[in-house]
Image (tube, helix red, strand yellow):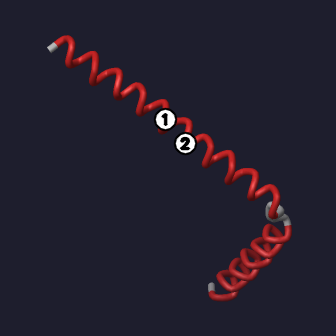
Amino acid sequence: MFKKMWDSTVEFVNEVKTEFRKISFPTKSETLGSTTVVIVFCIIMSLYLSVVDSFLVWLMSKII
């Protein structure tokens, strides 16, 4: 029983090592580019939502 458990644990660790070798980390320029896209998107969305919110507040004040 313990032999089977030990063998499966060793097999798992070996498979984890194999998968870790397949990892490709982004370069510095890729990370910077992705971060820039996210920040610009957040700024654009916050401006859009601010305009929509202001319009809805104005519209509700005219209705009520």
Q: What element carries label 1?
A: helix
Residue 49 x, y percent position in the rendering:
43, 32
The residue closer to the viewer here, 17 or 33, is 33
Q: Mark 2 points at which residue?
A: 43
Residue 43 x, y percent position in the rendering:
55, 42
Binning the other alpha carbons within 10 Å of mark 2 as few (below 14), some (14 to 19) or many (20 upward) gives: few
Residue under the point 80% across and 61% down: 26
Report the quarter where the C terminus lies: top left
Residue 13 x, y percent position in the rendering:
74, 79
Lateral position of residue 27 relative to residue 64, left or right: right
Q: Are marks 1 and 2 in contact (CB under 8 Å)?
A: yes
Q: In this view, does 44 lie above or below 22?
A: above
The residue closer to the viewer here, 54 or 21, is 54
Q: What element carries label 2?
A: helix
Picture quadrant where residue 11 is located: bottom right
Report the quarter where the N terminus lies: bottom right
Lateral position of residue 48 relative to residue 9, left or right: left
- Between the C-alphas of marks 1 and 2, the distance is 6 Å
Residue under the point 74% across and 82% down: 10
Q: What residue type is labelled 2?
A: Ile
Q: Residue 12 carries which label?
A: none
Q: Mark 1 points at which residue?
A: 47
Q: Residue furthest bottom?
A: 2
